Image (cartoon, grey):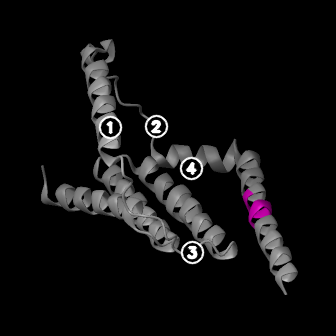
Amino acid sequence: MSASFLIIAVLTIAAAAAAMTLRNLIHCALAVAIAFVGLAATYLQLNAQFVGFAQILVYVGAVAILIVFAALLTRGGEPSQAAVFSKTWWAGIGVTVAVLGVLTWAITRSAVTQREAAPSPEATVKQIGDALMTKYVLPLEVIGLLLTAALIGAVIIAMRDEGKLK
């Protein structure tokens, strides 16, 4: 294992743990964005450039920002006054260990683990980009317009609710 992989893995796991444990919604959203960046860095380190850049564009550039916008527009950033741990936390840990055990058993017994790895595809990032900008340009534009319309709708709904409060 290389040192860069260890640094990226620790950063990603720490950001994911912070997203689960922090009480402020905005801080959680930013921690999720850092975890997404860590995953993208892992993909890039594994020479999966398209998946890494798609991770950055879709999750960091769209999903994480959308979470922050939604939290800010709905005033959902105030932390709740709930207890940090439930009284039955031990039951949750028990269920987690049981599910992990079943998944580990199923994966080790699966026929997929005994097969040879599939040959790597010959598609490059340039070929995928060319296909997106030539053959699939209309669906790409439609998705962009749909996401823009959803964002504008969220802003209008948030502004309408703000006007009722005054």
Tell me the tag on residue 136.
Answer: none
Front: mark 3 or 2? 3
Q: Are marks 2 and 1 in contact (CB under 8 Å)?
A: no
Q: Position of residue 27 (x, y in %)?
A: 45, 73
Secondary structure under tag 3 reads: loop
Which amino acid type corresponds to the residue marked 4 in the rendered image? Answer: Gly
Tell me the tag on residue 129.
Answer: 4
Mark 2 to mark 1: distance in Å? 39 Å
| Disc nearer the start of the sequence (3/4) | 3
Q: Residue at x 44, y 69 (%)?
A: 23
Q: Residue at x 80, y 80 (%)?
A: 162
Mark 1 to mark 3: distance in Å? 29 Å
Mark 3 to mark 2: distance in Å? 43 Å
Which amino acid type corresponds to the residue marked 1 in the rendered image? Answer: Thr
Mark 3 lies on residue = 77
Quadrant into which the C terminus falls? bottom right
Front: mark 3 or 4? 3
Q: Residue furthest bottom?
A: 166
Mark 4 to mark 1: distance in Å? 41 Å
Would you call the spot at circle 3 few (<14 residues within 10 Å), some (14-19), or many (20 or more)?
some
Secondary structure under tag 2 reads: loop
Q: Residue at x 45, y 49 (%)?
A: 50
Mark 1 lies on residue = 96
Which quadrant of the structure image shows residue 62? bottom right
Q: Residue at x 33, y 17 (%)?
A: 112
Secondary structure under tag 4 reads: helix
Residues shaded magenta: 147-151
Would you call the spot at circle 1 few (<14 residues within 10 Å), some (14-19), or many (20 or more)?
few
